[in-house]
Amino acid sequence: MKFGVGQPVPRLEDPRLITGSGRFTDDVNLPDQLYMAIARSPYPHGSIASIDTDAAEAAAGVVAVYTAADIESLGGMPCRAVLKDRQGNPCFIPKRPLLAEGRVRFVGEPVAAVVARTRTEARDAAELVLLEVEDLPAVVDLNAAAAAEATVLHEAHGSNLAIHYENGDEAAWEAAAAAAAHRVQVSLVNNRVAPSPLEPRAAVGHYANGTFTLYNPSQGAFAQQGVLARAIFDEPLESIRVISGETGGGFGIRGEVHPEAALTLFASRALGAPVKWHGDRSEMFLSDSHGRDNLTRADLALDESGRALGVRIETLANLGAYCSAVGPFVPTMAGGRVVGTVYRLPALYHSVRCLYTNTMPVAAYRGAGRPEACYVMERLMDEAARQLGIGRDEIRRRNFIPSSAMPFVNHSGVSISSGEFEATMDLALERADWAGFERRRRRSEGLGRLRGIGLGYYVESSGGGPEEEARVRIHPDGSAEVIVGTYSHGQGHETAFAQILSDTFGIEFDKIRFIQGDTAFVKFGGGTGGSRSSQMGGIAVKRAGEGVIEQGRAVAAELLQSEPGRVTYEAAVYRLDDASAQVSLADVARAAETAQFGGEGLAETHRYDRGAGTYTFPNGAHVAEVEIDPDTGVLHICRYTAVDDCGRVINPLLAAGQVHGGVVQGLGQALLENVVYDTDGQLLTGSFLDYAMPFADAMPDVDVSFNEVLDPNNELGVKGIGEGGACGAPPALVNAALHALASRGVTAIDMPLTPEKLWRAANGLSLQERAG
Amino acid sequence: MRYEAPSSSKEAAKLLASAKGKAVVLAGGTDLLVRMKSGAVEPDLIVDIKRIGATQEIKKSGNGFKIGAGVSGARLGKHRALKKAWPGVVEATNLIGSDQIQGRCTMAGNLCNASPAADSVPAMVAANAKANVVGPGGRRTVAVEKIPTGPGKTSLKKGEIIESITLPAKAPRSGDAYLRFIPRTEMDIAVVSAGVNLTLDSKGVVKKARVALGAVAPTVLLVEDAAKAIVGTKLDDDALAALAAACEAACRPIDDMRGTIEFRTEVAGVLARRAALTAYERAGGKK
């Protein structure tokens, strides 16, 4: 089957996207629409003394100006994390208002919304909103936020600690540590990044005839509908329609409802006209959710032969000023599900303190907690190998969970269903010519450059919400229509799901129509995030398709005057088992629309339930090889090898694309990307000049291959591939750089590995680039 | 806001000299338009110099190349004779911005924007380029290093424009090179940069040298001590070390998120050394 599962089918969506005919939110313009602009806080922390909107209201073209006092009827932006600490105390989650209430807590926090006739008028008027605050000290640094004397962001709570999450057994760890022949410690920074989807956020809100319609980029319209209806507007679900056309990248942060989107709906209802908002790039740096931002100390206990006895991992995690939609879930449970990653660890203690600071809230970003968890273990393994004088591949070999131990229940009680970690690593080592490295290193040395090679093994727990829904209908012309609750914002579901249905029905690929991202059609769905679409949407689509075939079999049996048990289905034709008669899928669909067969047509809605607490476990071995110029600190990535186990590969082109994207984002974090607030809480990285995202020409050709170990718990055998690259690349790259710098006596370095940092490390200078 | 596009430099100078309020010159516009869009500057008068014939020409003569103030980076990059004579200057100019910016940006604009990190300027200074200035008082010729006086400030008087830039005729056995350091590979502003221009004698000994550094002081620096360190040598290791040391001694950089004083200072020496080696090779010197 040319277009079936496993085939490298080119993306159906590409012609539309590359010829500019995709319809993004900014392409939506409604008659008589007004424009909104947001006045944002220039102060990191302060009590609001006054917000003077007189000048803004009097400005040309201005229709309305709203502050918190005007939107009291609206709820705040909810956080769906449900966490308790060991004593049973719930996580402290403060209200996150759409517009600042009483205090401003980060630079860029929305303070007022200005609506005017044109975008320029709105923006000009927004600059006239006068915010006066009584300054409060800004809390930026994680250690400072945790200190007893720290200024408290949310006064009622009494400290900046949202929750102290703990997992594992501290006493068991202590015992393991006491018995250990070796102890290896690392202290790590997982740097804050700005995910920066290429499409800046936009929203068009339209209230008419008692119904709200919101056009905005998302990772799934249904989830947004629920948040808007329940948490923000307190209106029935059906009174809000969310439409996401094309979305130019999500990476986790488009999975939430943002204040501007809700405000366009509010303003539209108040003003009786559609309201459009469109953020620019600088605004995105200030007000798009950030990712990562952890400080971690980890301690690994090993026996004489380098086998791990236990690990202790203690993290301070930055939440920002409020909780994002997932907030404290990311550094605790999301990453915690795979704490210890792919290694057997008889004892484990995991502690995470989630803290509020005067910075933009941190949300889920490609991998969301898992890249952080993998980075810790991979840095520990390399450091252990160095200290014990064991090969870096060998120490992993000695500690991997063997495939014979699957399913393996880890310290979080999560059952890792499958994986061949050693075999996958060996494939990667072979493709990367790990064994031939020394020859290449000598060549680099002759040119005055430091060469290194590094490994990053990752495992994820994927799947997100355990339920997903798909509806498949066969039209009387024999074509299929599929509506699904996942949401492709670049991943290529239109292609992948058509491949699955093409396989299921044996119909041609181009006869399948794909619908997503509009709550008028999508009545349920978890959207796309957490590498869940192939395993959740894919299964739901497949089963809905199979349900349609079964329904059709009953109709066909009647048409053929026989029993369903005697009717076979293949390639859009139902036949009697003795091949004496047949009827086409199209004929069956037509018949199903008649009163005789209930008139409902041939359609099936399937809600797939994976089962709470179950996940899939994409994993893989990534190998980076680098060369560093010690005189300038410039690092060149000579070679990059990724061997991923994402279960069954539905489409190798799409899967490789996901690996490329994930790897490049991981390398960006490892090499260049860093959100910097100064000690006063001002954002220093407010543009792509100061926030360095890598360019394509600095990225290596990624050698992508797969070790397909099928997931035993779903019939497609898929695991997910969206986030692995972002998990594998940072440790592979940093371990390679440390390997290169080993000859200069360097044993630790933190991301991002900017040229200056590498230059300092290579030349024995203090790694502190600047005071403060 | 008034927009004028005169057809002669004299007329442009007259318009600028008699302007009331903020008057600006528009060539490629890659700096000006961005500043206007962001509201950083609100000019009362814009004088577009692209309709002036002399600003659009690249003229080769016995005295070298006269490059009009409106000639884009992309055009320079396609000019074979110029690239052959002054590869360092052309490469430096071609580093400015993206491909799209290259279609508009100019050497003269880069000079007048007066950023200490301007890419084409150290290369022009090393090349001993001259700016041909037209003003209400007539014409004058100024060494390019005398144009910027500090970040965003130039020595041009009210009414004066740069009509063109002259690069001298290439001396036999000479070569130039420019290198910059940026954290990424392109579309970035130099954290530190170096331009070197050398002339050798028949034995491969450096006879004349000019060394310029960017982004290490309020203006691009012409470092005479660095030139002295290599004149009379064949760029042996000691000479290169002395060159680097002289460059480091001349640096007075700022400390910011993009680079520390320490880094900029030391890498200035590294880049000067590497640029000198490239220039030496281009001059026909053999190591």
Image: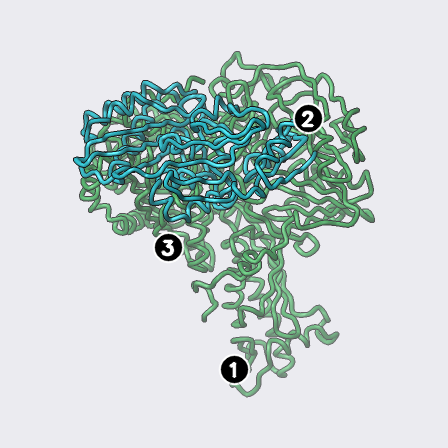
Say which amino acid is labelled 1: Asp
Q: Which residue is drawn at 50% across and 60% down?
A: A11
Colour for chain A in the figure = green
Q: Residue A709 carries which label?
A: 3
In the depicted structure, whether residue A667 falls above or below residue B14: below
Q: Which residue is drawn at 33% across and 46% down?
A: A640
- In terms of depth relative to the viewer, which is nearer, A469 or A36? A36
In the depicted structure, whether residue A423 falls above or below residue A692: below
Which mark is in front, 1 or 2?
Answer: 2
- Label 1: which secondary element: loop
Other residues around mark 2 within 10 Å, as few (<14) / some (14–19) / many (≥20) = few
Measured in 3D between alpha carbons, the distance from the residue under mark 1 to the one under mark 3, in whole angstroms, is: 36 Å
x then y, percent, for residue A536:
53, 53
What chain letter is assigned to the residue under label 3? A
User: Which residue is disc 1 drawn over?
Assistant: A577
| Mark 1 on the same chain as mark 2 | no
Say which amino acid is labelled 2: Lys
In the depicted structure, whether residue A483 falls above or below residue A356: below
User: Which residue is disc 2 drawn over?
Assistant: B20
Colour for chain B in the figure = cyan
- Label 2: which secondary element: loop
Which mark is in front, 1 or 3?
Answer: 3
